[in-house]
Amino acid sequence: MPLFNKKFESKPIPVRQGRCNTGHPVATEDLDDFRQISLTLGSKELRFADGIWMHSSRKGDVDDMLRLNRKFRALEEENNMCNLKIEVMLDLLAEHATELNELKPKEK
């Protein structure tokens, strides 16, 4: 008899043979119906799009808002990339300026 015997061993879990809801039809719903969720509260209508609720008077407003938000994000990324390129160029310019300043006194 070993000194450290495993008294509590877990039993292997049997593999599932099929779906749990056997005998019931599989739910086939069109997910496009749930992509455009709208909520009407009194005279105001809210639409859920891109993870946020937006106030809109018609469906086209939300589409325009989403298009403008995507364009805004793309322009922000482009602006960040341009700022990064400018910083790199300024660093290179400063490095070359210091190298030139070090070489000038040696030439005299």
Image (cartoon, rainbow, N blue to C red):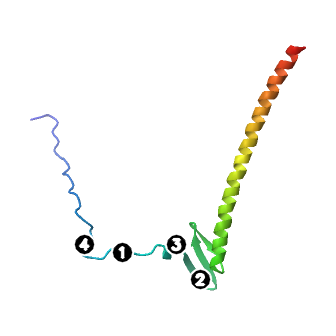
Q: Tell me the CA gap for discs 4 and 3.
A: 29 Å
Report how many numbered discs are placed on residues in the image.
4
Query: Dots 2 and 4: beta carbons under 8 Å?
Result: no
Q: Is label 2 or label 3 in front?
A: 3
Q: Amino acid at mark 1?
A: Ala
Q: Which mark is residue 35?
A: 3
Q: Which mark is residue 18?
A: none
Q: Tell me the CA gap for discs 2 and 3.
A: 19 Å
Q: Amino acid at mark 4?
A: Thr
What residue is pinned by disc 1? 27
Local packing at callout 3 (Cα closer than 10 Å; few below 14, some 14-19, many 20+) is few
Q: Tell me the CA gap for discs 2 and 1.
A: 31 Å
Residue drawn where x is 36% and y is 75% of the image: 27
Q: Is residue 45 above or below residue 22?
A: below
Q: Which mark is residue 22?
A: 4
Q: Is residue 73 above or below residue 55?
A: above
Q: Is label 2 or label 1 in front?
A: 1
Local packing at callout 1 (Cα closer than 10 Å; few below 14, some 14-19, many 20+) is few
Q: Tell me the CA gap for discs 1 and 4.
A: 12 Å
Q: Amino acid at mark 2?
A: Leu
Which residue lies most toward the bottom here?
A: 42
Q: Secondary structure at mark 1?
A: loop
Left or right, 100 with respect to 48, comes to right
Task: Examine the image and state in which quarter residue 97 appears.
Answer: top right
Q: Which mark is residue 41?
A: 2
Left or right, 3 with respect to 85, comes to left
Q: Tell me the CA gap for discs 3 and 1.
A: 17 Å
